[in-house]
């Protein structure tokens, strides 16, 4: 079953007098339960592509289908509901709310999404797998960068998504933290969650089903 279908997607930006394509005629499909990495240098268009996939940006041309939803046609309300339920998005960098505890951060999307009932034993289990189960009552500022990153991953998986899109989840982390995260993604994909992750960490190659290479906004053929 095809979960993500991207067809001829381009995104043009204007900077001053200059127009350019940050994403250029990109097409690919991802099947249910696949773990796919998008690899490319900084500035190659990974975050722009992910903003298009999650409906934060509208494509200049092309179409995006995720779980049979035509993303570029959904309104803001439907998009934010989708992102709080079936489509989990882990944005690049630090994105926890600093004045909420770890547990409050993790529960936040659930309170906005489809699963109003909280399954605490499931949340405890995924926090354990990510090694953050003893930090539930801490504030993000008392956690290391790697721990904070694992909390934002826990938050996304706690919303019980069918698809997860993660933008450079291991960027600037040590090998140990990066491995915990990559192993976790692999396990979740084996449970049937479809995962698309961007990275320039070559170690990811050992964990994923396949890689797409992006350069200057274009997917390269291998
Ligand atoms: P990556 O995530 O691979 O580092 P990005 O998608 O963030 O790359 O950026 C791709 C290119 O698009 C870069 O040249 C960046 O400066 C440019 N860019 C990103 N967002 C905008 C924007 N909102 N307006 C203009 N240019 C942008
Ligand atoms: Mg980026």
Image: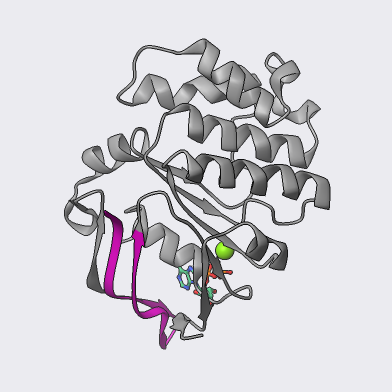
Q: In the image, residue 210 lies at what x, y percent?
A: 52, 67
Q: In the image, residue 218 lies at what x, y percent?
A: 44, 82
Instruction: Give the magenta part as a residue range.
Output: 1-30
Q: In the image, residue 90 lies at what x, y percent?
A: 52, 45
Q: Is residue 58 left or right of residue 129?
A: left
Q: Is residue 145 left or right of residue 208?
A: right
Q: Is residue 99 visible?
A: no
Q: Nearer the viewer, residue 196 or 16?
A: 196
Q: Quadrant of residue 187?
A: top right
Q: Is residue 88 left or right of residue 37?
A: left
- Residue drawn at x 26%, y 54% is 1
Give the answer, above or below, for where 88 lies relative to 130.
below
In this view, which residue lies farthest toward the front? 190
Give the answer, above or below, for where 23 lies relative to 222.
above
Q: Is residue 100 left or right of residue 142?
A: left
Give the answer, above or below, for where 145 lies relative to 169.
above
Q: In the image, residue 171 lies at what x, y percent?
A: 70, 56
Q: Nearer the viewer, residue 40 or 12?
A: 40
Whether the magenta-drawn stretch holds residue 18 is answered as: yes
Q: Quadrant of ligand 2?
A: bottom right
- Residue drawn at x 68%, y 32% is 130
Q: Nearer the viewer, residue 188 or 113?
A: 188
Whether the magenta-drawn stretch holds residue 11 is answered as: yes
Q: Is residue 112 visible?
A: yes
Which secondary structure dominates the residues rendered in magenta?
strand
């Amino acid at each position: 079953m095809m979960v993500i279908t991207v067809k001829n997607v381009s995104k043009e930006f204007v900077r001053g007098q200059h127009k350019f394509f940050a994403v250029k005629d990109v097409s690919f499909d991802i099947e249910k339960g696949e773990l796919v990495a998008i690899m490319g240098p900084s500035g190659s268009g990974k975050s722009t592509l992910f903003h298009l996939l999650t409906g934060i940006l509208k494509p200049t041309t092309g179409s995006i289908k995720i779980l049979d939803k035509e993303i570029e046609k959904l309104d803001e309300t439907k998009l934010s509901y989708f992102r709080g339920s079936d489509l989990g998005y882990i944005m690049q960098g630090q994105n926890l709310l600093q004045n909420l505890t770890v547990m409050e951060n993790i529960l936040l999307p659930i309170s906005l999404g489809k699963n109003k009932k909280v399954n605490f034993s499931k949340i405890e289990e995924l926090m354990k797998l990510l090694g953050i189960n003893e930090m539930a009552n801490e504030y993000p500022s008392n956690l290391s960068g790697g721990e904070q990153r694992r909390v934002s991953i826990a938050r996304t998986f706690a919303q019980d998504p069918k698809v997860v899109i993660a933008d450079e989840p291991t960027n600037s982390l040590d090998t140990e933290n990066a491995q915990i995260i990559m192993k976790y993604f692999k396990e979740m994909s084996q449970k049937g969650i479809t995962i698309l992750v961007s990275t320039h960490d070559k170690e990811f190659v050992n964990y994923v089903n396949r890689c797409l290479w992006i350069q200057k906004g274009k997917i390269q053929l291998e």
